[in-house]
Amino acid sequence: MKEELKKRSVTAPDGQIIEIEPLRDYYCEAPPTVQTPAYTKIVEKLFNWARAESIWILGFGTGCGAIEMRPLMSPRFDAYRFGVQVRPTPRQANLFIISGYLSVKTLKRAIRSYEQMQNPKYVIGLGSCTINGGMYWDSYNTIKRLDDYLPVDLYITGCMPRPEALLQGVLDLKKIIREGKGEGANKYAENFEWYKANQKRVIKDWDMPEYSW
Ligand code: SF4
């Protein structure tokens, strides 16, 4: 077990000794559950409208396509007018954009970030690398198909896709959500064992609990 994950005690400024058990304190192992729809169709429709109009992107650039996320919030593209904004923490975000190639090392962080996001949550795969490995198709340390590891709601093709394509992708995602088809988080919960098996197959130094949120 890594040093930083071992149980230890630290001394607070007031002299108090505090016991820290990282795997218990920083993670929760309760598996994800399927979120059932609201009890009436009209309420669910209202919820979906609200979800579509408040897309909060997790500000986590994974590959070179991340550079295309920056102009999105600039005056030229002004994604804010569509209810889109960027958040610094997974706790506040509901859209994870995997912006290109994903190394196995980053995949580990991406999984933890995705699991920390609250339901309902969505994933966009930006660029060819997320679809089939792109120009890294024969790389030894990148994954090839993102949807083997995380549930993808929408892919945007290109290498690299321009901000216009990204903006159009977000608008298409809004349509999916409004129609009640943004079911990625439920798919993840339903097929949890399958996703975990795929993740562990490539992440050899798995040292996290099964699910961390
Ligand atoms: S699709 Fe192209 S631009 Fe995007 S991460 Fe891959 S190589 Fe980079």
Image (cartoon, rainbow, N blue to C red):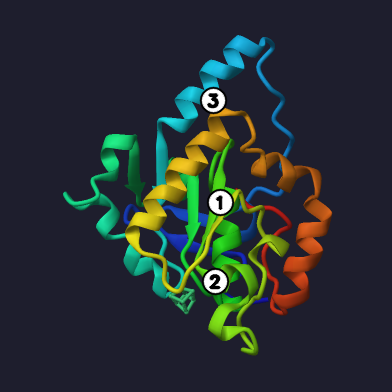
Calculate the distance from the C-alpha at mark 2 to the C-alpha at mark 3.
Answer: 29 Å
Give the CA distance from mark 1 to mark 2.
15 Å
Q: Residue 123 — which label?
A: 1
Q: Residue at x 69, y 78 (%)?
A: 205
Examine the rendering and report whether any part of residue 23 can be seen: yes
Q: Which is nearer the N-term, disc 3 or disc 1?
A: 3
Q: Tag 3 or tag 2, which sits nearer the N-term?
A: 3
SS for dot 3: helix
Residue 105 in percent (x, y) is at 57, 77
Q: Nearer the viewer, mark 2 or mark 3?
A: 2
Amino acid type shown at disc 3:
Asn
Asked whether mark 2 and ligand 1 are closer than 8 Å, the reply comes as yes
Q: Point out residue 48 in the picture as x, y percentages from the top left corner.
A: 54, 25
Residue 7, above or below 52: below
Q: Look at the numbered discs 2 and 3 and tell me whether their residues touch, using CB distance below 8 Å.
A: no
Earlier in the chain: of badge 1 and badge 2, it is 1
Q: Is residue 199 above or below residue 194?
A: below
Q: Amino acid at mark 2?
A: Ser
Q: Nearer the viewer, mark 1 or mark 2?
A: 2
Element at badge 2?
Answer: helix
**Residue type at numbered disc 1:** Val
Q: Report whether 63 appears left or right of 103.
A: left
Q: Which residue is mark 2?
A: 128
The image's mark for residue 154 is none
For label 3, the residue is 48
Camera-nearest residue between 102 and 77: 77
What residue sits 78% from the left and 74% below the top?
A: 201
Q: x, y (%) of residue 110?
A: 55, 63
